[in-house]
Amino acid sequence: MIAFLKGIMEAITDHGCLVDVNGVGYEVLMPASQISRLPALGEPVTLYTWHMQREDGVQLFGFLAPEDRGLFKLLLGVTAVGPKSALAVLSALTLAQLEDVVARQDTAALSRIPGIGRKTSERLLLELKDKLKTPAAGTPVLPAAEQETLAEALEALAALGYSRVQARQALQKVAAEALPTGHSVEARLAEWVRRALRFL
């Protein structure tokens, strides 16, 4: 089992990337949302991978964080959900957004994802309800726009050197507070990060 790759970014494609690991090139499939966050060609990269053996060959799926790989594996465990559908979900939703969708049992939100029909959406919501962490009772469910700000704040904290686990825990505490509204996206993002740093 290939658990991770640490090498040099050789090429970026529409579906993933090519990583040079000591002279061996590994083709890695990735969610579209993470492809855009890959380092430049020639730069070092670490990908957390899931190795899948198929009748027609071997496929390697890569993610920028272990939590993303774990979510991919969780999605694969849902009835009738294959790697293509799992990548589609991860391309459209962050972990926080998916938790929110599952908590609200929002079939429409999942059905809007290309390749995810209504039946698959219903199956995902049913099987993920007890497997995926959802907001606890009394925890505010944020609107979609604020979920996007939260996801950006998570990346900003990770860039500062905090682990995604630490950052997510801090941001969950911030989410329980009254946050300013009506400000620009940049201002709200800065406020999320400022408040989260108090808990880190």
Image (cartoon, helix red, strand yellow):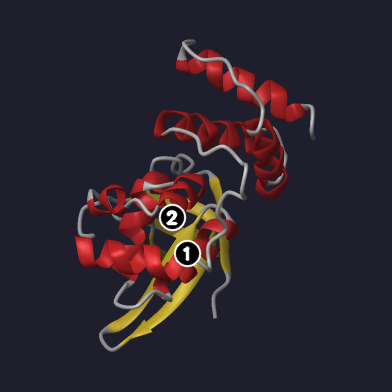
Left or right of 159, for residue 64: left
Q: Quadrant of residue 190?
A: top right
Q: Quadrant of residue 29?
A: bottom left
Q: Residue at x 59, y 37 (%)?
A: 154
Q: Which quadrant is home to the N terminus? A: bottom right
Q: Quadrant of residue 107?
A: bottom left
x, y (%) of residue 155?
57, 37
Q: Residue at x 42, y 66 (%)?
A: 61
Element at label 1: loop
Q: Is residue 25 visible?
A: no
Q: Is residue 145 above or below residue 44?
A: above
Residue type marked 1: Lys
x, y (%) of residue 165?
69, 49
Q: Residue at x 54, y 33 (%)?
A: 150
Residue type marked 2: Val
Specify the label residue 53 is tagged with.
none
Earlier along the polypeptide chain: callout 2 or callout 1? Answer: 2
Label 2, residues with CA under 10 Å away: few <14, some 14-19, many ≥20: many
Q: Is residue 141 above or below residue 118?
A: above
Task: Give yes or no for contact between labels 2 and 1 (Cβ–Cβ under 8 Å).
Answer: yes
Q: Which quadrant is home to the C terminus? A: top right
Element at label 2: helix
Specify the label residue 129 is tagged with.
1
x, y (%) of residue 45?
55, 51
Specify the label residue 102 is tagged with.
2
Which residue reaches farthest top? 183
x, y (%) of residue 198?
79, 27
